Amino acid sequence: MHEGKVLAYKRINRDLLSGLFENQLRYWAIVMFLGLVVLVAVVAAGFMVNRGVGVTGLNRPVFWGFFITNFVFWIGISHAGVMLSAILRLSKAEWRRPATRAAEVLTIFSLMTAVLMPFIHTGRPWRLMYWVFPYDFQRGIWPDIRSPLVWDPSAVNTYLISSILFVFIALIPDLAVIRDRSSGIRRIAYSVLSLGWRGTPRQWKLQAIAGILLSALILPVFVSVHSIVSWDFGMAVSVSSWHSTIFAPYFVIGAVHSGVSGVVTVMILMRWLFRWEEYVRKEHIDALARLLIVIAIAWFYFFAMEFIFGIYGQEGDELATRTLQIFGEPWGWWFLTFIITAFFFPVPLWLFRNVRRSFLLMTITTISVNIGMWLERFLIIVPGLARKQIFTQSWHTYAPSPIEIAIVVGTFALVLMLFLLFAKVFPLIPIFDIKEGQVLKDEIKIGRRKVPAVIREE
Amino acid sequence: MPNLPPEQDKVQVSVEGRELSSLMVTREVSRDFFAITPAYRRVLLILGVVFLAGIIAIILRFVDGFGVSERAQWGYYSAMFAFLLITAGSAPLVAVAFRLTKNHWRRPFSRISELYAVVGLLSLLWFLPLMALLPPIEGRKTLWVSSNFVGAPLWWDLFAVMFLVICGLGLLVLSAIPDAALLARTGDGGVRSRVLGAVAGFWRGTDAQWRWHRLGLTALGAFYFMLLIMVQTLINVDFVMSLVPGWKDSIMPAHQALAGLQTALGCVLVGAFILRATGRYRDLIPMESFWAISKILLALSLLWGYFWFAGLITFWYGRTPVEQNVLRTFMFESYRVPFLLNFFLSFLVPFVLLMWNPVRKSVIGPTIAGASVIVGAFFMTVRLYVPAFGIEDITSHGLATVPLPIVPDVLDVFIILGGLAGAGLIYMLAIKIIPIMSIWEIKEGLLYQRVRPLLRSRYLVLGKPD
């Protein structure tokens, strides 16, 4: 038997549009709280801009700290959108249906937040304009287009634009549903957004083709983004522990690990907040957890390879950095926390069916993964820089200031708040996808048992 | 699996295919398994002769010189070993991986892939001379941290290869038990029937037996997967990277493992195509299975290109003298030709072919792509192992000069052909001991698949048991 009930289309419309047409107290309470945290972060950022980066813990030789770690982390989270949506769409995994929109939206907001971080990191964000329009022609200061730091904005912006397009194309049929249930100015807005959708066979066909094409086209962009972020580090020969050929796939698989975990957390939150018990079911979380086991093991293999080949060369400075990473104060504890929370705590638990089908345990384990993955990025960036170049003569440690902590915490609140505000305007679960899933459901009778089955899409 | 009367369990599992029943499956596989045709004998003879020529070439190579100081002339021999490990060692993963993910299209491919485990015996024998050719690890970079590591690297490498072969054979035997029991009952009463009966006589197909069978296959399969990746890493580092002074490339073992997965699909595709081309099992190996596996092959080929580029660009930007010399040796100067062949056949050809759905949705398209990645993998092992074996000063600080290319001589050609023929010979012998179609899996597939109408068309309905 299939786990979910067969629901009437009217009920699907009503349930999945409840976020748009109903006002819940707890929803607004959460949004207000998140808004408050964001406000604190904005004040902290304003203070930093006013006083200068001296209020942060950044100092010679560690010039990349919490902000850049956070940049890499949010870029990583953004990978869940494409991973789940495009790959599962192409592979026609049935359980993808309630997860795709949330994953795509998480991509957009986490990317936008990631883009914020380098701006904040500069301390004088407006000076980035000088970088685009060089102010001192006599001295010949131009951006070096061969630098991965230049590839970064190109890749991230391409990914952001294509992700928005991806979400929009998938939203069109749902926008038409909202249009047909709205009135006044709201109706006009949704009419414009739904681009005259009537649900004709030709429109469905075009929408399906556009979805498949975008899925296929966005995949290289998705891989390139985090690869390029990894090359920000990997191309630097001077920082020991950074110059490694495996960095690109290691970063990408790490991003998928944290991104998919993030999607699971968000899906469970959605289920609780909007009471979508019929749509986000145990089978979906179970399937995502199975996927996470594979991703986590692959990630661990790449982690092991990166680490083993770090010490393989037996080079003094590399060994010293690795020692600092694992045994140095306070990073030794951070390293232990990272490896336990990212792998050794969640993965063995996911091997048990009861854990995979428990919303509470899945929430805990997926949050644990993201704690670990945030620390992983920190441990890649900071210890390497702390021992940067043998001739620096000033090895120094790094400790984040309260300003940095406030801004980083604020980014988490920002992503969550934007996500919830999105739910007020657009459905977070694709309505047409859920209905299509119901059409494709079937059963096969074997003896006296009925086995759930699905009609394979061409 | 329960055997229903033939008139009750006739089902269509392919939109364009004909109806099948479990009895038809048993009859077809059993007939083919017990028949030893003149064509089969001729193929065995040809493979045997070429294999023998290869063995003679190896003996002549021994006479030429055998030892650490003569390892340069054994480069192609070592490349052949790596090729056997990459292809035959990885091939059983097709059955393992897609059994874990419960894909129905894998069913006709499962046994074709598992049977490659028998080629592991040849890999193991092929490995033994290499033990005497590998120099000690003192003074060079090694995975084993210290040269005092007991048994490192040779004995650990030998154990690793041996364990992999045993594990692969275990997987094959375990998977074949239900089929062996069936064929022992339905067979011709000859020697093979009696042997199969003795091996699988205990099998009654009870619920408990099926449960243990499934559990065993899952556990052993998952273990094999991890073991293979580890073995590939060990062998590639000990026999290639650590022979090149100063070369530190963390993606190389992963790239080799990925090439192995890619080649595994190629081996299965070519095997399935040959079966169909010889007029057998056309209904049991539907086009849909080729279509499905081709998508995975496309994805792996793209990953191949990505891994290669990730390694290249990091070295390209690093610009240290060692990195430049490594690139010039393995890609751009000395071994440019095998590199280009490797790049075209492992990445460009499958990518350009398989990006088109009409090509994927055919039998010949994925097969050509599969054959291409197999040949590409061969050139990959040549461009890595031959230069690594040819480097003289392996204890210097870094690769100071680009070594000259080593061109294969007549003996090398015969060694390579002999290795390929040996692999084919062992495989061909094995298909008369264990059936090349997994009868129980195909019958299970008949239970879980139906072709049903929806609106104005007919679609495949796939059962999704827990």
Image (cartoon, rainbow, N blue to C red):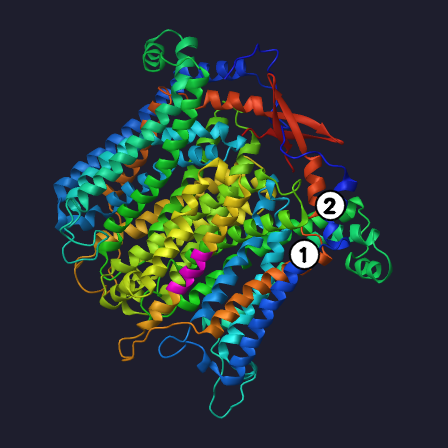
Amino acid type assigned to the residue bearing label 1 in the image: Tyr
Image point (63%, 66%), residue name: A35
The answer to whether residue A220 is seen in the rendering is: yes
Which amino acid, mark 2? Asp
**Residue A457, position in %: x, y?**
65, 37
Residue where numbered disc 2 is placed: A15
Secondary element at tag 2: helix
Relative image position of residue A189 (x, y in whole percent): 80, 61
Quadrant for residue B20, please give it.
top right
Question: Callout 2 environment at 10 Å: few (<14), some (14 to 19), or many (20+)?
Answer: some
The image position of residue B62, as x and y in percent, is 15, 40
Q: Is residue B342 visible?
A: no
Q: CA distance from mark 2 to mark 1?
A: 16 Å
Give the residues in magenta: A371-379
Image height of A205 relative to B316, above or below: above
Q: Check disc 1 and report the residue beneath it.
A: A27
Query: Which is in the foreground here, disc 2 or disc 1?
Result: 1
